[in-house]
Every structure is written in structure tokens, then in C-alpha cells.
Amino acid sequence: MVRRVDARPTIAPPRTLSRAGRGLHRFANPGRFLRLSGALLPWIAAPGLALTAAGLVWGLFFAPADWQQGDAVRIMYVHVPAAWLASAGYLALAGCSAASLVWRHPLADLAAAEISPVGAGFTAMCLITGSLWGKPMWGAWWVWDARLTSVLVLFFLYLGHIALVRAFDEPERGYRAGAILALVGVVNLPIIKFSVDWWNTLHQPDSITLFGAPTMSLVMLWPLLLSALGYTLVFAALVLARTRAAVMERRIRALLTARARHLEILG
Amino acid sequence: MKLFIALLARELRLSLRHLGDTLGALLFFLVAGALFPLAIGPSPETLGRLAPGIVWVCALLAALLPLDRLFGADYEDGSLDQLLLCGLPAAAIALGKALAHWLATGLPLLLAAGPLGIMLRLTPEALPALLGGLLAGTLVLSLLGTAGAAIVLGARRGGVLLPLLVLPLAVPVLIFGAAATDAAAAGLSPRPHLLLLCALLAGALPLCPIAAGAALRGAAE
């Protein structure tokens, strides 16, 4: 058997990196991200707004009232998608944090810092609409059951992340501390999801599951799914726009610093 | 292991020399607990009903007090960098710090919790559940607090930020700890709540030092 000599230079990029990994890393380049997101943003924002508006109009005006809850059930079309997005947003925050800790992509840092205010906003909307719904149905603005408490903890985790990321003089330290905090807080997500199954809560259990028939009428399900899709796109559009702004802000700061240094050398 | 014991001994020697920190947390615990009978009235039924929650909340807040000095002094005078270079993994250093915090703060709180509970008219049958719950609970709090202290290390207003980060994460400890004492006071078995507390401890014991270690390495860069 002839031993073949490998002619490739030894400093070639490691071949062990999987194709999928390389494919994803391509998008971590800020310049490519700016071009791509700039082209995508209108196509996400416009359908997002249109779907949200359609779902809400359908749900608030045309869907039937509940036989038991009456018109109060219409709060669902605002409340349930906000609750889904609150959890999904935290999952995205944790994903960005893991990417920033493992690969140190600056873009993941910026995205994580921009996801948490948007997620906190959706969580606040979920809590406020839930409170408005609870008053006519349960007779109380707030009850301390497991679902409500765990979502409140999620809200505090978001606020803690916002405060922590911005509390350091060097931004990189803040991103790193925030990433660790976000990953620690992930334990709360399964608690939120399963709180209605593990404990006997006043909050109802899930009506819609991944496998298995939904326990709600289709005439209510369609507007709900429509507004959920719309909310998701709006969430993505907000995060994209904020991340773009953060990238540009960072570039401007770098340019200003470079100019100041240049002037210093000249003067 | 030898290094770990040396680290623990160093931390304990330091907390012995700064006995005021431990005493401060302990006094805060007792004084805050003693405020409740004055605020809500001395009637035994009300007090006895509220006692488990009061003791737990005061223990939670008192355990937070010494946390901002846990890494602060070492960070400022550079000994944190030396600790990270001594050969122990950063997670082991965090675990040592958490154990030292528990021995210096959690254990005295545990000793003071019994008298405070009796002063708050807790039924004597509930005392073993209170102490057993606090034993596991203060350990989890020390671990969580160490992770929080490592994360806010070097932040502006870190002392204000620390409770904001740690308290939401400590909510399950508070719920199950107070529920165990409540169950025992009502004549039920506190066992399921105590087992859940131990499960929290079993989860926090490996995870919190890892998170704290990652944060320490970030702070020392």
C-alpha cells in the first residue's frame, strides 16, 4: 500500500467543523448580517403587522363569544400569543447566550442584549392582559398560582438581564455576565410550561398541544394561530431592527474613536 | 483536594477575622424577624400562622447581606487572579467560596432560626421541619448567591443588582421551604416538600459552581 503524502498546508481551516456549523457561522459576520437583515426586515415586519392586525380584528370582532366566558374570552387573542412569545423569546435569548459563550460571536452578544427588552415587553403585555382577564373570570386581578408566579419570575429574569448587561463599564464583560445569567434562568422555562400540569392551578392547562387535538373550537383556533404567527414575526422584526441599530451604533462609535485618535496624533 | 481544603481554611480564617460580617447578618435576621410581631400584633394565632414565612423570608434576605463582599475584596486586591492561577478549576473555587459562605452565614442562621421561630409562636412540632428545610435551603441559597455574586463582580451598583438577580431564582427554595414548615404546623407530613428542597440542592450543587466559575474567569480576564 502506498502511503500518500498529504500536500495540504497544515494551517488550513479545520475540516472537523461540520457543514451546518460553517453555514451558521457565515451569518455571524456583521457586514453580511446588516445586508441580509436590511433586505429581510420589510418582508418580516409588513406580514407581521398585517397578520397581527388580521388575527386581532378577526378575534376581537368576528370570532364567536364563549358560551361560558362571554366576550371576555376575546382577551385570549392578545394574551396567549404574548405568553408564547414571552417564553420563546427567552429561549432565543438563551440560544444567543450559548452561542456567545461558545463561539464568542459579537453579533450573538448584541442580539441577546436586544432580545431581552423586547421579551420583557411581551411578558409585561402577557401579565397585564392576563390580569385584565382574571378580574372578570376569577374575580381577582392577581392570584398566586404556579403559572402566574413563574411568569412573574420570567419577567424579573428579563429585567435582571437588561440591568446586568448595561451595568458594566466594558460592554464585553456585561455581555458575558448576561449570557451566564440567561443560561442559569433557563431552568424557569420548563417550570412555566409544566406548572399547570404539576400543580393544581387556577390558570387552565394548555388547550393546544403539539401532538393531539386542540380542546378549542376551530373558529376560535384560526384567529389565535393567525395572531400568534403575526406576533412572532413582529417580535423577530423588532429584534432584527434593534440589533441592526446596535451594530450601526457600534460602528459609529468605532469611527468616532478612530477619528478622535487621528486628530490627537495630528494635533 | 488539598488545595480545596486550603482554600476553605483560608476563607474560614478570613471570615473569623471579619466576625462582624457574620454577626451583622445574624443580627439582621433576628431584628427583622422581631419587627413582625410589633407590626402585625402579638396574637399567637396570627403570628404562629405567619411564622414559617417570616423566618424563611428573613433568612433569605440575611443570607444575601454578606454576598457582595464574597468576591469583592479578592477582586479588588488581586487575590482572585492568584486564586484562579493556583491550580484549582474556577468551579472548585466557586464551590469553596459557597461552602465558606454557608459555614459563616447559613449555619449561624440555622442556629438562630429555632429561637426566632419560638419567639414567633411557631408550634414546636413544626421546628424540625423548619430546621431541616433551612439546612438544605440555606445551602441552595449560598450556591445561588455565589453564582450571583460572581456574575455581578465588577458591575456598577453590583450590590443593588445582586438581590434583583438572586431573589427571583430563590423563589422555589422559599416556596418549598415555607410549605414544609406549614405542612408540619398543620399536622401533615413535610416530607414531600423537604425532598423537593433536596432535589433543588442536588441540582444547584453542580450547576451553580459551574456558572460561577465561568463568571469568575470572565471577571478575571
Image (cartoon, rainbow, N blue to C red):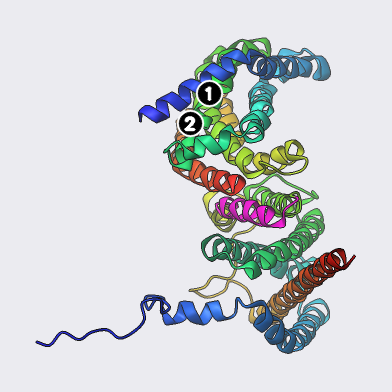
Q: Position of residue B29 (x, y in %)?
A: 69, 19
Query: Does the residue at mark 1 contact the one at mark 2 (Cβ under 8 Å)?
Result: yes
Image quarter for residue B102? top right
Relative height, residue B20 to residue B93 (above, below): above
In the picture as drawn, the residue positioned furthest to the right comes out as A267
Q: Residue at x 75, y 82 (%)?
A: A48
Relative placement, left or right, of B213 versus A171 is: left
> How many residues crowd around disc 1 within 10 Å: few (fewer than 14), some, or many (20 or more)?
many
User: Does dot 1 land on a helix, a strand or a loop?
Assistant: helix
Q: Quadrant of the N terminus of chain A?
A: bottom left
Relative height, residue B129 to residue A166 (above, below): above
Label 1 is placed on what type of residue?
Glu
Look at mark 1 in the image and give the residue it sits on.
B11
Q: Residue at x 66, y 52 (%)?
A: A173
Q: Residue at x 69, y 66 (%)?
A: A110
Whether residue A6 can be seen here: yes
Q: Is residue A140 inside the magenta stretch?
A: no
Q: Residue at x 53, y 47 (%)?
A: B211
> How many residues crowd around disc 2 within 10 Å: few (fewer than 14), some, or many (20 or more)?
many
Image quarter for residue A105? bottom right
Relative height, residue A202 to residue A47 (above, below): above
Q: Quadrant of the C terminus of chain A?
A: bottom right
Q: Is residue A178 inside the magenta stretch?
A: yes
**Residue closer to the observer: B200 or B22:** B22
Could you give the CA–CA distance between mark 1 and mark 2, rounded to whole angstroms?
Answer: 8 Å
Label 2 is placed on what type of residue?
Gly
In the picture as drawn, the residue positioned furthest to the front comes out as A266
Chain containing mark 2: B
User: Does dot 2 land on a helix, a strand or a loop?
Assistant: helix
Look at mark 2 in the image and give the residue it sits on.
B96
Q: Position of residue A164 (x, y in %)?
A: 72, 50
Question: What's the magenta region?
Answer: A169-188
